[in-house]
Each structure stands twice: as C-alpha cells, then as structure tokens.
Image: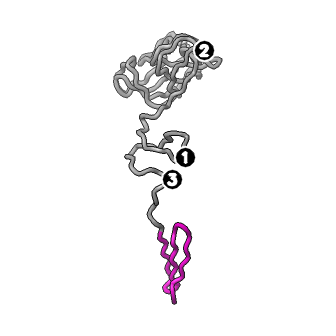
Amino acid sequence: MSDIYVTLQPATINVTLSPATINVRFPVSTVGPGVPTGGTTGQVLTKQSSTNYDTAWADAASLSLSYYIPAGQNLSSGRAVMIDGGEAYYFQPSNTAHAGRMAGITRTSANEGNNVEIRAFGVIEDASLSFLPDKTLWVGTDGAITDTQSGYWLVLQKSGISMENDKMLIDFSVSILK
C-alpha cells in the first residue's frame, strides 16, 4: 500500500497504512516572534517595551517588586509602613489600629507628600539592616526592623527573616494583637 501524505502548515504528518504507524514530524522553530534564545537557569522572560515580541531574559532578583505611594510623614529607608488614606506611614506596634495592616518595607526615604518606594514581598537589601542570618525579624517603634520583641508593644508584627548582614526575606504573615 502507498503512503498517504497530509500537509498542515508548518507541520507534515506522514501516515503509513501497512504496518499501521503514524510518524509526525515538526520542523525546527523559525526565527521570528516567540521566546528568544539564550537565558540561564533561574532567569525569567520579561517585556522590554510595549512593542510586540520585544522580550529578553532577566535575572529574577533584578526585577522590581516595588510600588510607589505618597508618604504621609517623613519616612526613612528600611522601615515597615502601613497605608492609610492612600499614604504611607510608619507601622507602630503601640497602635492596635495597625494590626494586620503592614504594607511593606521602604526602599527609599521620602519627605511628606513625596513618593516613597515600598517593597511588599521578596528579598530586600538595605544598609540599615544589620542582623545575624536566620533570625525572625519584628517591627519596632517607627517601623524599625528588629530581631527582639518588646513587652510594651500592643501589636506583635513579623517583618521577615534575616538572610545576611544587610538582607532580609520579607514575610509579614504574623500579626498578633495582644
């Protein structure tokens, strides 16, 4: 019996009736829209512009995980903040109204009314952080990150886990109202 060929662009399907076998062959990808070549383990594909197919490989750690919001007061870098009325304020463990409202850690300083960069998840590196690795970190007065707890706090708010001297993994999943 002869071969029967059915061609579907861009693939060719070859069907042989005796013995009964099906052989499907797809051509190698052609140059054009799609995933660019290259990249290494751990990298992610990112858009470079609003142009279609303008993509490139990037290290996941280099991507921005931050957002910007007006500061409701003068804020320092490396401090825990909460959002109230669309503005960022220091998280205060002495204020029960702040329980469960931590929004992230400031990446920049900002004067009242100016935008401050806030990181809500991921890893943050800041010279103001100085802890031994693998310590549970808490939020202290005026949003200060600390590895100790105070008996005077009314809200026990976890801020993360220390990774290195100036690096922490943000994790504010624990908020306990005393």
Magenta stretch: includes residue 113? no
Find out whether the residues at labels 3 and 1 contact each other: C-beta distance under 8 Å. Answer: yes
Report, in whole angstroms, how far the alpha carbon at label 3 lies from the one at label 2: 53 Å
Looking at the rendered image, the disc whose residue lies closer to the viewer, 3 or 2, is: 3
Report, in whole angstroms, how far the alpha carbon at label 1 lies from the one at label 2: 49 Å
Residue 27 is tagged as none
Q: Residue at x 50, y 77 (%)?
A: 14
Residue 129, quarter of picture: top left
Mark 1 = which residue?
52
Mark 2 = which residue?
96
SS of the residue at dot 3? loop
Relative to the observer, which residue lies in front, 5 or 77? Answer: 5
Relative to the observer, which residue lies in front, 83 or 156? Answer: 83
The range drawn in magenta is: 1-25
Q: Residue at x 38, y 25 (%)?
A: 167
SS of the residue at dot 1? loop
- Label 3 neighbourhood size at 10 Å, few (<14), some (14-19), many (20+)? few
Instruction: Report the amino acid beneath label 2.
Output: Thr
Mark 3 = which residue?
33
- Compare marks 3 and 1 and give the one earlier in the sequence: 3
Residue 32 percent location from the top left of the image:
48, 55
Magenta stretch: includes residue 24? yes
